Image (tube, helix red, strand yellow):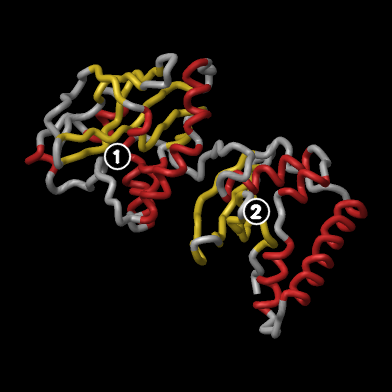
Amino acid sequence: MGLLSKFFGKKNVEERKDEPEMVYIPNEDERMNWAIEKANLTLWYFEESLKNPQPHQVYFSVKVKIVDQDNSEHIWLTDPHFDDEGNLFGTVGNEPVNVTTVKFEQKIGIDRNLISDWMTIENGRLIGGYTIRAIREGIPEQERQAFDKSINLYIDEGVDHFKANLDSPEGAILALEKAYNEKDIDAALACKDFHEEAKAMLSRLNMDTDEEIIASTAEVLNLSFINNLEENGFPDFSNLQNAFTEREKTDENHWIITEVCWFPDGGKSVQKLNTFKSATGWKVLAPVSED
């Protein structure tokens, strides 16, 4: 039996009616929406891995939205591959529940814009599988071990593969860490917004502010940032693996991102970082205070 069959089982609607809705994506669920966004922002890694699979990668699958008139369902495809135009092809990996346009084990082609998740198994770890993780996070913690056993997967924080750019909060954090690794002050400064950081700091201090005070505070923060790098050196994020396990929305332009860093010796650290969506992309502000 394949991995997806273990996950969903080849069952009819009546047999599955009392089980968790593992194939549905509720639009109102912010956690699931973010899972789909993460999958699409990191899809490049899945595609590159498919083109050149490594010995430690033993499984590939991709989840797509199947539309049947007024109904839709998110279904995993096995044996996925992309053509030169980026269209996706694969085999339906579980029995559909809510649509009749596809059948279990049917080979189909589908627009890449309908991809909602991807997964690989690397060295026994689930990589990707963001909608699976979102489902798991909704399960009481004491029941998660049984969930993992039922789907025959080892699930930890995983490793995320956002591109290091300013297109997402996570990408901005990686871009800043890349600048640190390359000892590039200009690149690091491009990932920061000291004006917004000054506003946030002054707000926490409950100070009366105007644009002049904000600008002068931003200048001090900028100089302090540069002096710290020159005096203490650049932080070293090389040889680390990253996972971004949580987004906390403050408002439309501010998000708190939880980053987990895995060290070569097996240790890990967890930090929360403030990010801001500016006119030129996402920026990294000061870490969240633990006070």
Above or below 162: residue 29: below
> Image quarter for residue 277?
bottom right
Residue 125 in percent (x, y) is at 48, 34
Amino acid found under the numbered disc labelled 1: Ser
Above or below 152: residue 195: below
Q: Which numbered dot is residue 283?
A: 2
Residue 189 in percent (x, y) is at 77, 51
Judged left or right of residue 200, residue 56 is: left
Residue 175 in percent (x, y) is at 68, 43
Q: Which residue is mark 1?
A: 150
Q: Are marks 1 and 2 in contact (CB under 8 Å)?
A: no
Above or below 291: residue 152: above
Give me the residue at 36% from left, 49% from top.
32
Query: Farthest residue in the left direction?
Result: 14
Q: Which numbered dot is residue 279?
A: none
Q: So how many labels did they put on this image?
A: 2
| Relative depth, front residue between 156 and 202 | 202
Give me the residue at 12% from left, 30% from top.
100
Give me the residue at 64% from left, 70% from top.
290
Sort mark 1 into few (<14), some (14-19) or many (20+) by Cα contacts within 10 Å: few
Give me the residue at 52% from left, 22% from top.
48
